[in-house]
Image (cartoon, rainbow, N blue to C red):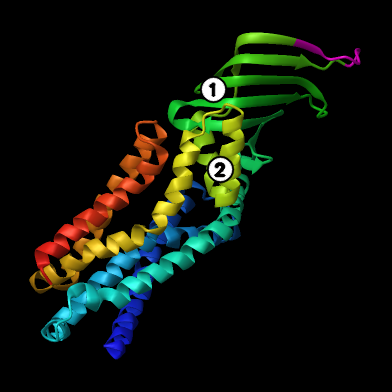
Amino acid sequence: MKIFDFYIAKVFFVYWFGGLVVFATLYLTVDALGMVTQHSDVGIMSFVRYYAYSLPALIYQLFPVICLFAVLFTISQLNRSNELVALYSMGHSLFRISLPVVMCVALLSLVFFGISDRVFPRLALKKKYVEYVEIKKRPGAFGTVKTNRIWYRSENVLFNIKTLNPQESSAQGVTLYYFNDTWDLVQLVSAKSVVMEGSLWKLTDGLITIFMEESSFPLTKNFQSKNIVMNEEVADLQSASDSSDQMSLGELSRFIERNREAGLETTSYEVDYHSKFSFAFAALVMSLIGLPFAVERVRAGGGFKNVGICLGLAFLYWSLYSSFLTLGRYGALPPFFAAWIPNMLTLGASGVLFKRLNR
């Protein structure tokens, strides 16, 4: 059986690399065509750098689908060649036969999880820089996380945000630095919270500090509410920030803790933190639920049927996963459960399917 385990693992990796090439090529082709069409005046090297920084994270995002694809075709090939029947006759269950495949998926998941935590945050930062500075020509919208704050620039205004909640168009812990044409600081505005209505920002519970050339002492004044007009739309800030992607698990954990101690809303970041762990298991649970389908359906449709099953299961899982994460970000579910319930439900469904097979 050990020899056959190596044989199954070899077949799995052949299909895995095939799926990687197919899905990554399709995604990059479609995305690149849209990007080049929208930004036809950008040099080719900017696009090359953008997709070079994007590719590792893209592969990680497609990783569960690629694993499901490889599992379906591996077991289907064993079924078509009657090797699966032979192993059944030797008293082996479907799970035992699939064990080398499951172990390969688990090993790849651990490797990709480690890489995603160590390497991807730096690549995400470089990708955002190329996207907003070189391609979109909007360096002010390039958001970075420094000293636990998210920084932006809008013309002669620098501002940082402790916590951004794009779903509710609001933010907390906002400080704006206004400069004149010679980049001397002329005004500082800080607020505990802000509601963003397009370019109109409604600040509450804040302080204004004015710096004047004729006086060495700045003037300060408190305010309960104040409206200001900004050039940044909240949708732009949402797409430009993605601060969770720019931090490792340790950095994100410290970011959450310090903002929580400051009394700021951290629910969205907590959901992102737990989802980093739960996503690492997505490939494993999707592979497990795909195994029964590989056995039941192979004789009815061949390869195209397997591709359809792969895409269908992937769509159902991502719909479930995205829905629960959204519920978590809106506070309808605790962050931990919002991130893990999709995996639990998928594992439960795979257990029921295995029991029905009785193999």
Query: What amino acid is labelled 1 in the image?
Result: Ser
**Residue 217 magenta:** yes
Label 2: few (<14), some (14–19) or many (≥20) C-alpha neighbours in 10 Å = many
Q: Secondary structure at mark 2?
A: helix
The residue beneath circle 1 is 199
Label 1: few (<14), some (14–19) or many (≥20) C-alpha neighbours in 10 Å = few
The residue beneath circle 2 is 243
Q: Which residues are magenta?
A: 213-220
Residue drawn at (46%, 51%) of the image: 276
Looking at the image, residue 45 sits to the left or right of residue 59; the answer is right
User: Reading the chain from its start, which is encountered first: label 1 or label 2?
Assistant: 1
Q: Quadrant of residue 339?
A: top left
Query: What amino acid is labelled 2 in the image?
Result: Ser
The answer to whether residue 131 is seen in the rendering is: no
The correct choice, above or below, for 277 with respect to 223 in the image is below
- Residue 41, percent across and down? 56, 49
Q: Quadrant of the C terminus?
A: bottom left
Q: Main secondary structure of the magenta part?
A: loop
- Residue 107, percent across and down? 42, 71
Residue drawn at (61%, 26%) of the image: 173
